[in-house]
Image (cartoon, rainbow, N blue to C red):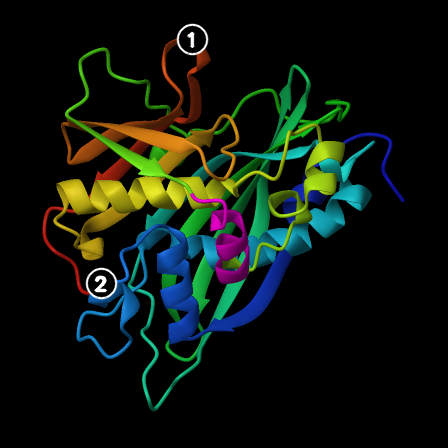
Amino acid sequence: MAPATIDLQLLQSRQWSVDTSYNASIIISYNLALGAAGTNLPLTFEAHPSFHALPSFACVPTISVMGAVSQAFPSLLPKFQPHNQLHGEHYIRSLAPFPIPSSNSPTVPIRTTGKIIGCVSRPRGVTVTVAIETSHPPSGTVICYSEWTSFVLGIPPAGASTTTEDRGPATATYPTPSRTADKVLQYKTTPEQGALYRAASGDLNPLHIDPATAKRAGFQGPILTGTCTLGVGIRQIIEEFAGGDVGRFDWVRCRLSKPVFPGELVRTEMWEEEGRRIAFRMVVGDGKGEKVVIGNAAVGLKTNAGNL
């Protein structure tokens, strides 16, 4: 039964854990869904000595636990409607490499735990932030920490916080620099990309594949998952500013502003800043029809090459 008002203490007391696993095929499918070249063997050949997942692979277990969180929202938020929940902001911090499947251990188990850490009043509803930790149970190693912020429209804000807690890079905003971008890359999404990313990531929301569902949600057609667009941008930044070494990826923070439709051309504009930080934004269209699809965004890089 839906509550009459937001109970912040109840929200922040809830926790969800999901046990999942992955194998080499999932890593390869995920990398290809983000536009990795089939000839890039460290991303597509499981026997390559440097075989690895792209940094945004952290989104795969995150998606699984957010499914459990979203199922609980009707009992936690007044007047909650699933179609009014929008993935608005995202943060990932890499703490250790994802273990690589081997002939001895072809499937890698992982545990992902989510906890609501914020519910903030907004003009049209609330934002709900879920802190997510992914670990490798056999070793106890924490692989990554993420924060997933949803804009939930139409929620009466009574009981919600009025300010966001300062959590450093996880809550910082990164305005677009006024100078010319240091690097600009274009990426042509494909009509098949939404289907490929759904299969690779496990995000089976029909909004990303079914025209009828997309139309009911107010879109002209299926839209790419926001973490797919983000993953493409991170891949491009790592290739351009870290020589393709994913071990140098430290963190990313962004706002998911507008949807991308499969087949659209996405332009990624990148600025190298102090502190090994790369500010970026991702844009569709030119001039009058231009829309920013990812903004207020930055990637932090480590000084030295990391271990794959």
Residue identifier under label 2: 39
Q: Callout 1, which amino acid?
A: Lys
Q: Position of residue 61 (x, y in %)?
A: 50, 60
In-front residue for pair 265/1: 265
- Say whether residue 300 is left or right of residue 99: left
Magenta region, residue range: 190-200
Answer whether residue 251 is visible to the viewer in this image.
no
In-front residue for pair 8/265: 265
Residue identifier under label 1: 288
To which quarter of the image does residue 153 belong? top right
- Say whether residue 259 is left or right of residue 58: right
In-front residue for pair 297/160: 297
- Dot 1 falls on a residue whose secondary structure is helix
- Say whether residue 84 is left or right of residue 48: right
Residue sitting at x 67%, y 49%: 206
Using a 10 Å C-alpha cutoff, classify the residue at mark 1 as few (fewer than 14 neighbours), some (14 to 19) or many (20 or more). Answer: few
- Dot 2 falls on a residue whose secondary structure is loop
